[in-house]
């Protein structure tokens, strides 16, 4: 079941944080970073976030989470994570497609590490194209991807 998560709840913020930590550790290993910024994010930061969180549950397990925000016509994807025990089951695609179909947007953007091949493949599958690349202060090469709906 995919639903909006009430991330201000301590219980749900803890569950979101756990999935973030497990998934971002895999990404940190992919990019070869021992000091990966997303791993520094605290549970209280999740609770106080102005973003929204969509999550998928399988039984009692929170298996995927996408953090996002919407303005008038732009959908910004801040995070998309899948619990490592549930990798390669299509859950990232399912929650991402649910998000893209539930929000009203004309432009969408997302950033990821350039070395995160699975994320780049996922976003490419949904028509996102690379807009820019840069090196962070932490020495991680990042990629920004965009998608614009053609209306009419």
Image (cartoon, rainbow, N blue to C red):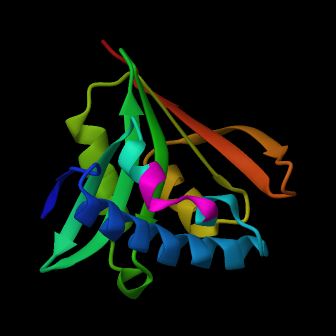
Task: Please identify the quadrant where the C terminus is shown.
Answer: top left
Please tell me which residue lies in front, 114 or 23. Answer: 23
Q: Is the magenta stretch mostly helix, strand or loop?
A: helix
Q: Quadrant of residue 41?
A: bottom right
Residue 101: x %, y % from top left: 24, 39
- Residue at 79% x, 75% y is 32
Judging depth in this view, the residue of 40 and 92 nearest the camera is 40
- Taking 23 as reference, is 145 left or right? right
In the drawing, does residue 33 fall left or right of residue 63?
right
Query: In the current view of this chain or complex, which residue is farthest to the bottom?
Result: 85
- Name the quarter where the N terminus is drawn: bottom left
Residue 115: quarter of image: bottom right
- Residue sitting nearer the eye, 36 or 66: 36
- x%, y% of residue 64? 33, 67
Q: Where is residue 137 in the image (x, y as percent from the top left)?
A: 86, 49
Residue 54 visible to the viewer:
yes
Please tell me which residue lies in front, 78 or 47: 47
Residue 43 on the magenta segment: yes
- What residue appears at the point 60 percent right and 40 percent down from the top-left corner? 145
Which residue is rendered at x = 56% and y = 68% of the image?
A: 118
Q: Residue at x 50, y 52 (%)?
A: 123
Residue 50 place in picture, x, y as percent: 39, 35
**Magenta highlight on residue 93:** no
Q: Is residue 146 left or right of residue 125?
A: right
Residue 125 visible in the displayed image: no
Marks counted in the figure total 0
- In the image, residue 108 above or below residue 137: above
Name above or below for residue 87 compared with residue 65. Answer: below
Region of the chain picked out in magenta, as a range: 40-45
Q: In this view, does 11 lie above or below 7?
A: below
């Amino acid at each position: 079941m995919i639903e909006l998560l009430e991330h201000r709840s301590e219980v749900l913020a803890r569950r979101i944080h756990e999935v973030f930590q497990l998934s971002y550790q895999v990404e940190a290993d992919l990019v070869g970073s021992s000091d990966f910024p997303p791993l520094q994010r605290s549970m209280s930061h999740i609770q106080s976030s102005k973003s929204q969180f969509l999550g998928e549950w399988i039984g009692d397990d929170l298996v995927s989470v996408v953090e996002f925000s919407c303005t008038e016509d732009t959908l910004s994807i801040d995070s998309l994570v899948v619990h490592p025990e549930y990798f390669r089951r299509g859950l990232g695609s399912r929650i991402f497609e649910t998000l893209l179909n539930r929000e009203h947007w004309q432009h969408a953007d997302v950033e990821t590490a350039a070395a995160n091949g699975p994320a780049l493949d996922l976003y490419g599958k949904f028509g996102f194209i690379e807009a820019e690349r840069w090196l962070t202060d932490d020495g991680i090469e990042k990629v920004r991807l965009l998608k614009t709906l053609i209306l009419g």
